Amino acid sequence: MPGRWLPHPRFAGVEVRSLGQGEGFDASELRVPIGGRIPNHVHEDEWDISFIVSGHGAHHQGTPPGETVTECRRHTWLAVPPGMAHGLVNTGRSPLVFYLLKVKRQDRP
């Protein structure tokens, strides 16, 4: 059963709830408010794999001048490798909700 919605510890206005954990991974659901954002950040030791449940957004990956921006909406998959800068902006008229699977790198203890 999913946990309760809590304020994200790092991103103002974003809510998160746990969907479970296992060896080497953590699953959660995030909700970004209308006009909200998850600023660019980097995870050195884990993959971020996301599945958009509802809403519309712009996913930023990489750093300028090589940054790519991908429009995302319901049923969009996103995969970010370790060490890659990435962020997400809610560009829609409703909260942007997505599942997030964080998977630890297998080449490091």
Image: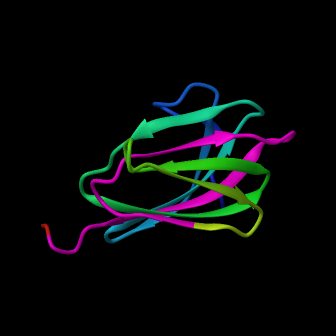
Q: Say which of 26 and 62 sits in front.
A: 62
Decide: is 98 above or below 107.
above
Residue 17 sits inside the magenta stretch: no
How many numbered callouts?
0
Residue 83 sits inside the magenta stretch: yes
Dividing the image into 4 quarters, which one contains the C terminus? bottom left
Q: Say which of 41 and 23 sits in front.
A: 41
- Looking at the image, the residue that sits furthest to the left is 109
Relative horizontal placement of residue 46, taking residue 75 as reference (left or right): left
What range of the chain is rendered magenta?
A: 78-107
The answer to which image quadrant residue 8 occupies is top right
Q: Residue at x 73, y 30 (%)?
A: 35
Residue 95: x percent and y percent? 79, 42
Residue 9: x percent and y percent? 47, 31
Q: Say which of 94 and 99 sits in front.
A: 94
Residue 37: x percent and y percent? 61, 34
- Looking at the image, the residue that sits furthest to the right is 93
Decide: is 38 above or below 56.
above
